[in-house]
Image (cartoon, rainbow, N blue to C red):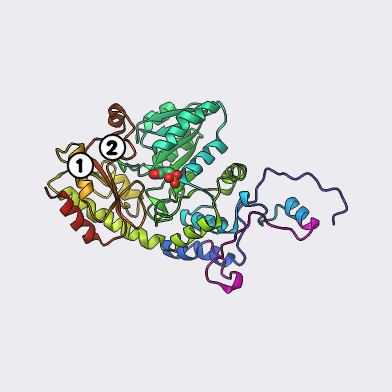
Amino acid sequence: MANTTPKPSNSTTIPASPAAPLASKITKLEQHAGSSTISVHGGEARCKPSDAITDSIVCASTYTFEDTDTIIRFIENNEQREEYGRYGNPNERVVERKLAALDGAEDAVIYSSGMSAMVGLLMAKLSAGDEIVFFDQCYHRSREFCFKHLSRFGVVTHQVPTGDYAAMEAAINERTKLLVSESPTNPHLTCIDMEQFVALGKSCEVETLIDATLATPFNVRPLQFGVDYVLHSATKYLGGHNDLLAGVISGSKEQLESVRNLRGIMGGINSPHNMYLLQRGLKTFALRMQRHNENGQAIAEFLEEHPRIDRVYYPGLPSHPTHAIAKQTMQGFGGLITFLVKDADWRETASIVDRVKLARIGPSLGGVESLIEQPLVMSYFQQTPENRKKFGIPDNMIRLACGIENTQDLIDDLQQALER
Ligand SMILES: Cc1ncc(COP(=O)(O)O)c(C=O)c1O
């Protein structure tokens, strides 16, 4: 027992991801490894309890200390171990290390959903009087949080047309703290020129955030371009099996410290079971992405040639307005395709969706099962026609999230659904 009275602890600091025992070999390996190797081994200890090849699910809401001296050492030396379930759990830690390795990041903080990650980051980084600037094709719930809720705490949000860097620059002032974009955007698949976005942030001394949910670290790693924070809804491709919700923010340890601390207070964390599912899903992440990319490209090309299709939005097609940026910055273009049916009203468009047999009708994307939806009757049903027009959501729009089924089966199914 220490013979001096213990100093009060800095109780706002929550330990960062503890290094896994014997993880040093893996960390060295990760620096040179490919994405499939990182998906399988990244962030994991080489030797695990019971000599098991898989991680155990650690079901504990609290963690115990051998004696008082151990507690004092833990606090005074900021030792890396678990303390209480709201600050993290071993299954979260391993997933955080794996995701950080995939993103090429120093650290990653995991949340219970993509939106929880977005709210956590914004609440940690912004104070009353601060301002943020969004590109207007960002996920509508992120913008809704800013306009309806952050505004109540005195944070001002500006929204400018996606890809209009001059408008973004004009919206920046001395109170601006964060520039936010998605790349590619949903459902128009607009890709951001990361170099220009980062250059703007750096020249104005404003931090930058990219929501790369649709790209994933397989197709683009925004941190390599100098972006400060990357957000993924892990509910989508990272989990990949339409069976869990999670979200993650990657970046530097220093910049994420306040984010991790606030998460420890908010408690938007994940159960060990959920994290085991995500870790398991991530093992095949790179393999799945190859097939999502192949399906996306082949089906976009098929649709573009089809006489009943008016327009296809897919960044892998030369007809897409940001194809050149996509080709320069991305390894592949993902599984999401948006298209417009020629001369069709909403009913005729809906009848095509209803005739599709393989893809299931539903929101979300990035899972092994293909999903299809008509944005008008899914995410935008409650919006006024004027608002839908403003968001670029016509009645004849269909969004297809290609899964990993065989390409030809998906094409044959769409072919029959498009027959009159
Ligand atoms: C681009 C993007 N970002 C964030 C989110 C939010 O993720 P979650 O549903 O996991 O909260 C979504 C959800 O659809 C999304 O499409």
Quadrant where the N terminus is found in the figure: bottom right
Q: Alpha carbon of mark 1 to alpha carbon of mark 2: how far? A: 10 Å
For image coordinates 65% across by 48% down, the residue present is 14
- Which residue is more in the foreground, 187 or 176? 187
- Which residue is more in the foreground, 283 or 97? 283
State the SS at label 1.
helix
First in sequence: mark 1 vs mark 2: 1
Q: Which residue is mark 2?
A: 376
For badge 1, the amino acid type reads Thr
Badge 1 vs badge 2, beta-carbon distance below 8 Å = yes
User: Residue 130 placed where, x, y %?
Assistant: 53, 28
State the SS at label 2.
helix
**What range is drawn magenta here?**
43-70
Vertical relation: 87 (above or below) 161: below
Query: Which residue, as the protein is rendered here, is positioned at the far bottom?
Result: 51
Specify the principal SS of the magenta part.
Answer: loop
